Image (spheres, rainbow, N blue to C red):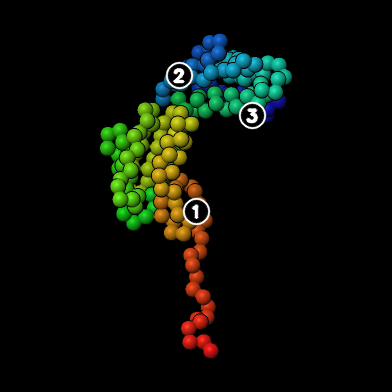
Amino acid sequence: MSRIGRLPIAIPANVEIQKTDDTLKIKGPGGEMEQSIPPGIAIEIDNQILRVKQIGDKKATQALFGTIRSLVFNKVLGVTEGFTKELEIIGVGYKARVEGAKLHLNVGFTHPIVYPIPSGIEIKVSGNQILISGIDKEKVGKVASEIRKNKKCNPYTGKGIKYKDEIIKRKAGKAAKTGSSFGAK
């Protein structure tokens, strides 16, 4: 049995959860989200505590037990606090700006990269920082990954887009030879 799956989820006072046969509707100050519940998994709500239960001992149910608990927990956390990812742009002349529902990136190419901002995601740019926020953890991470993919950091120069807490291991460039073969006898 999953250790994560057995952990109870405390439901904050400002969060409302409605359970139907195979879906869970989670509503809070940040918004509303849904989570589908596969067969073999049961949800119990008692005194503002949600518990995920496993019905039977099938291998597929055991595999989903902890995952469903984590997904429900992330949705509860998302509608109350939300999630954020921070990206850094490193490079001379590299910049970003938000215009309407599009993010414009100038990262060393001959043309600017235009990234359409999906619904439910908010992007703010200040200096060389890009702050991506929203209530869906998966969506926030996916958008951050897609933006970063446009110009990953070069391990030789360090230029590009990286996560704020990411450490780029720098590689040494070509080194000059110690001795010269010109004029040697």
Give the quadrant of residue 85.
top left
Rounded to the nearest angstrom, the CA distance separating label 2 from label 3 is 23 Å
Front residue of 8/150: it is: 150
Circle 2 residue = 27
Mark 1 highlights which residue? 168
- Marks 1/3: CA distance? 32 Å
Q: Where is residue 7 in the image (x, y as percent from the top left)?
A: 63, 26
> From the viewer's perspective, is residue 79 above or below residue 179?
above
Residue 92, position as x, y percentages in the image: 34, 56
* Direction from residue 36 to residue 130 in the image, left or right: left
Q: Residue furthest top?
A: 21
Instruction: Give the alpha-carbon distance from disc 2 to disc 1, as whole Å.
Output: 39 Å
Q: Would residue 14 be seen by someone viewing this image from the given angle?
A: no
Which residue of the protein is positioned furthest toward the right in this rendering?
57
Query: Going 50% across and 25% down the picture, which residue do you hit?
Result: 75
Residue visible at 43% across and 43% down in the picture: 149
**Residue under the point 45% across and 19% down:** 27
